[in-house]
Amino acid sequence: MAAAAQLSLSSVKSGYGRVKVIDDVSLTVATGEIVAVIGRNGVGKTTLMKTVIGAVPALSGAITFRGVDVTRLDATRRARLGVGYVPQGREVFARMTVAENLALGMRVGDAGRTNLDRVFGFFPILAKRLSQQAGSMSGGEQQQLAIGRILAGRPDVILLDEPSEGVQPNIVQEIGRIIRRLQAEEKLTVLIVEQNLALIRAVADRCLIMDKGRVVAEIAPQELDDPETAARHLSI
Amino acid sequence: MELSGQIFSWVYQYFDNMAFLLLAASGLILIYGMMGVINMAHGEIMMIGAYIAASAFHAGAPAPVAIVAAGVGAGLAGVVLERLVIRHFYNQLLSSLVVTWGLSLIISQAALLILGPSIMNMPTPFGSFSVGGFSFGVYRMVLFAVAVALIVAVWALFRFTAFGIAARAAMENPRMAAALGVDTKRIYTLTFAIGCALGGIAGGMFAQTATISPFFGQNYTPMAFITVVMGGSANAILGLIYAALYLAGVQTVASNVFNPYVGYVSIMASALIALLVMPAGISDFIQRRRARAMER
Ligand SMILES: Nc1ncnc2c1ncn2[C@@H]1O[C@H](COP(=O)(O)OP(=O)(O)OP(=O)(O)O)[C@@H](O)[C@H]1O
Ligand SMILES: [Mg+2]
């Protein structure tokens, strides 16, 4: 792995109040690499993502993004440095329109209109629903909006938290293809939390296995083809 | 005294009463709707605006300029208040009530210390006209027009501009907005300042109808408070309009059938009754009904 580290965590601990959830996580994601984080429910995958974007403060350790230490920066500053986040449960702004949601995503970018055309190329449905209230879209449509919103800002790194949740298989496949394409064309760096075996196999270069707030092992995605290994690490 | 004059007088009073509520409450309801804080010092912000407008006017500025200055000055006061105090009480309705009530006492007492109990005045412009033997001040209708213009401007600001979209996002889901690069703290400061600027402009407008003293704000805070609580926070602007339409109607009828004092008291009584039916305010009530109608 000669490429420079795009994102790295060293001995990061975090949690909520006195409850420590992330217990000493170190990991590195190289530029243009797609790393999957897998693990059973409640092991802290979402908390890890929130710690990386700054929604949950790190109690100790360091988080660097392209060599810049962002550990003490708030979520707003980190987003402006090019870290995009698609949360579990999508969190589109339900009372706002599709167009407004996309406009929010574009704030951090500077490429303007062409960006949006590109997003519509990936998710044609968004172009047709611009004036619809995001909250009235189906779950799968909202997921496409949540991903499109992030891509509109042209981030360098994206964090995807279970993008396949509640999304029909052909759209999941489409999401996989888009991630691969962005990796190939733009060297997009991705940290993805997933339970969906097919999606992990389609996109991941490496898999980190989490348990009780720690990264306990790393495996190659192909190893998940063994049903026993898959059953051990995924909550399905 | 003709019937046409009598009828016009009621209509005129209705619009006058509405203008009062809309102007006094617009900044307050904006802050409540966006940030879940009711600023009991809003009247004192209006008082600051009134003093600024009157001082600028007596220093030779034309009245419209004086009123804009009042808005800017009150907005700046809002920035200071937000940074020092309000910021710590977002979405804590009760604490914010107590704290801002304390602020209102501090600000009015400070004004009393600095400016003394002396009062200031501004002339009421535009003269009057008569209908059916009754005489009516033109300025009251200007108040109404300004109130409508301000509300439309605020609506457009939050509906169409990049700032407005970011502000609504920050209100709906602050963490996600921050994750998209929205500086939520700055948005809150600006929104609070805009609410105070509206109060300052209202103060400058009312400075031309009322005498200005350190306790000027007390004339407005109770009515504004009732209008805001009745309007609710579900949709601040619609809530404000509905509440003003309703309360001004009750007040107009009650003060004509009985007397102005009964009219004033009837606002409190009718708000109380309305809140029993619609505990979270009119805008919440209407949104729920619409949602239910859509499900059918
Ligand atoms: N806001 C919070 N306050 C307190 N505890 C929390 C909070 N959010 C999560 N937790 C706790 O932190 C632990 C890890 O939760 P997290 O959501 O990170 O797990 P996860 O691995 O993403 O699970 P899942 O696979 O179900 O999405 C859980 O025990 C959870 O109860
Ligand atoms: Mg999770």
Image: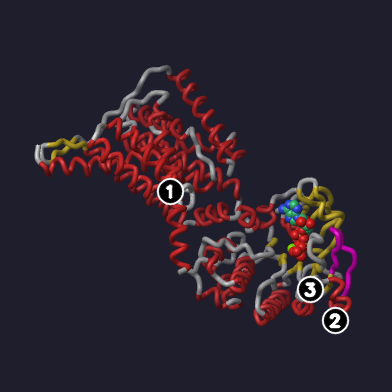
Q: Give the range drawn in magenta.
A: A208-220
Q: Do the residues labelled 1 and 2 touch (CB within 8 Å)?
A: no
- Do dots 1 and 2 share one subunit? no
Q: Give yes or no for contact between labels 3 and 2 (Cβ–Cβ under 8 Å).
A: no
Q: Mark 2 points at which residue?
A: A225
| Residue at the image point whose x is 82% and y is 61% from the top | A43
Confirm whether residue A45 shows in the render: no
Foreground disc of the pair 1, 3: 1
Tell me, yes or no, whether the two marked residues, 1 and 3, touch with CB atoms within 8 Å.
no
Q: Mark 2 lies on which chain?
A: A
At horizontal 69% and vertical 80% (from top left) the residue drawn is A173
The residue tagged with tag 2: helix, strand or loop? helix
| Residue at which label 3 appears | A236
Ligand 1 location (quadrant): bottom right
- What type is the residue that disc 2 sits on? Asp
Residue B74 placement (x, y as % from top left): 46, 35
